[in-house]
Amino acid sequence: MPTELPGPRTGPPRSRERIDRTLARMVGLFGFVFAVLSIPVLNDAAHTLRPEWGRGIAIALFGSILLALVSSLLDRGVRPAMGLVACVFVVTLVLWPFAVRSPTAALGTQPWLWYIVIVAIAAAAISFTTVWASVYAVGVPVVFAVLRVMPAGGGADVLHAVLDAGYSLLLGVFVVIVVTMLRTTATRVDAAQRTAMAAYAEAAKRHATENERTRVDTVIHDRVLSTLLAAARSETDDERMRSVQMAERALVALQSAEAESEVRAPVALSVLAERLRALADSSAADITFSASGGLSGKAPARVVEGVYSATVQAVENSLQHAGGAGVLRSISLHAEGGGFTVVVADTGAGFDPAAVPADRLGLRISIRERVESIAGSATVRSVRGEGTSVVIDWPAERAQPTAEDGAGGSPDDRAGGLP
């Protein structure tokens, strides 16, 4: 029964950011390729242009496209660079009549700008808002159609001009639609992820609150209820003294319950060993303690606290039910590979775990569920007349519990180790 929910991916949602980066690089790369492919057409039309205008237009357009490519690769200043491409293209389109040598020099030719119309529209889709990109995708082909019927634009008939402009219009609108859809989808994904993260945080908060409530409940049972039961059954002075000691420990546990819940730093296993040794030494009965293995390792504070509390309950159960004179009791701690095992054993009367009444909560709640709440396992081995052993195990591989662990339980649990 793991106490931690599997966490979602950390970091803010970045689907929109990744989509924008990918689209910008695609437009930059393909725009540069289209520009390079239009160079032969530019050379063929060079005789129709004034040298200074031809060179100026080529430098301005190719330079802005190259700048857009570099900006997209560096992911710096992408939108201004793409906007520059779109604006430069419109300016060159409007000033094209001034670039030809004479009104009749370009008759029968097609302005080479037609080959990069789609590049300019794609750059506008990256840089501008959806509304302005749509206006650009419609307006530029219209301006190009007007230019085509002019002598400076080749003097084409209206049908050819409309066909050329219509081809650019269809491709441009398609590009704007694709870019808008991808961006909208990415924005919705980011919004859904933020909503899911908020819902997870709320669920984790409720989960932690429930775990804390269960922890406090088990503290009340472990200490307060056990103390009351022991006091009610005490007949001798030693038993009454043990009840007083148990009452003192119960008060301390209740007062420190909130402080314990705030402890999150890992605790050395040597601290657990010292606490278990002190538990054995302060007990009214004679309890031996032994520790072995790598006590220099560490475990989460909640694990150490959970194991210690379960051990206290196991000792108190032994003191109450195993018998008095002649009963040998022991607490042992063995650490290995980051995990550890605590065994509380006695040679007392023993019992049948399957026959424990449902209203006896010491084994089922205070030991088993407390240990399971820290991703460990607890097993009781007892035979009438031969003593009892409570084995509390926290393996290293359970340090990060998964949902499968909580659903399936430990092998000992499925075998019915604890009532």
Image: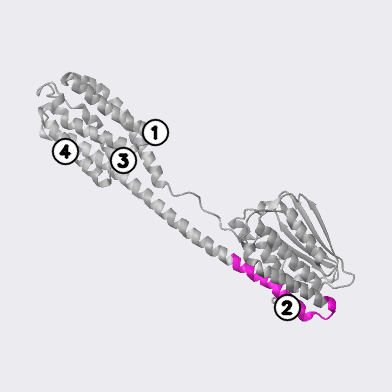
User: What's the residue type where badge 3 is placed?
Assistant: Ile
Q: Nearer the viewer, mark 2 or mark 3?
A: 2
Instruction: Compare marks 2 and 3 and give the one earlier in the sequence.
Output: 3
Instruction: Determine the residue positioned at 24% across, 30% down.
Output: 115
Q: Secondary structure at mark 4?
A: helix
User: What's the residue type where badge 4 is placed?
Assistant: Val
Check contact, mark 1 vs mark 3: CB within 8 A.
Answer: no
Instruction: Compare marks 4 and 2 and give the one earlier in the sequence.
Output: 4
**Alpha-carbon span between mark 4 and mark 2:** 92 Å
Q: Is residue 186 left or right of residue 102?
A: right
Question: Closer to the camera, 348 or 299?
Answer: 299
User: What's the residue type where badge 1 is placed?
Assistant: Leu
Instruction: Compare marks 3 and 4 and give the one earlier in the sequence.
Output: 3
Instruction: Compare marks 4 and 1 and give the one earlier in the sequence.
Output: 1
Residue bearing the label numbered 1: 73
10 Å crowding of disc 2: few (<14), some (14-19), many (20+): some
Q: Secondary structure at mark 2?
A: helix
Q: Secondary structure at mark 3?
A: helix
10 Å crowding of disc 4: few (<14), some (14-19), many (20+): some
Residue bearing the label numbered 4: 142
**Alpha-carbon span between mark 4 and mark 1:** 32 Å
**Alpha-carbon span between mark 3 and mark 4:** 21 Å
Q: Which residues are magenta?
A: 211-238
Q: Is residue 418 visible?
A: yes
Q: Is residue 344 left or right of residue 11?
A: right
**Alpha-carbon span between mark 1 and mark 3:** 14 Å
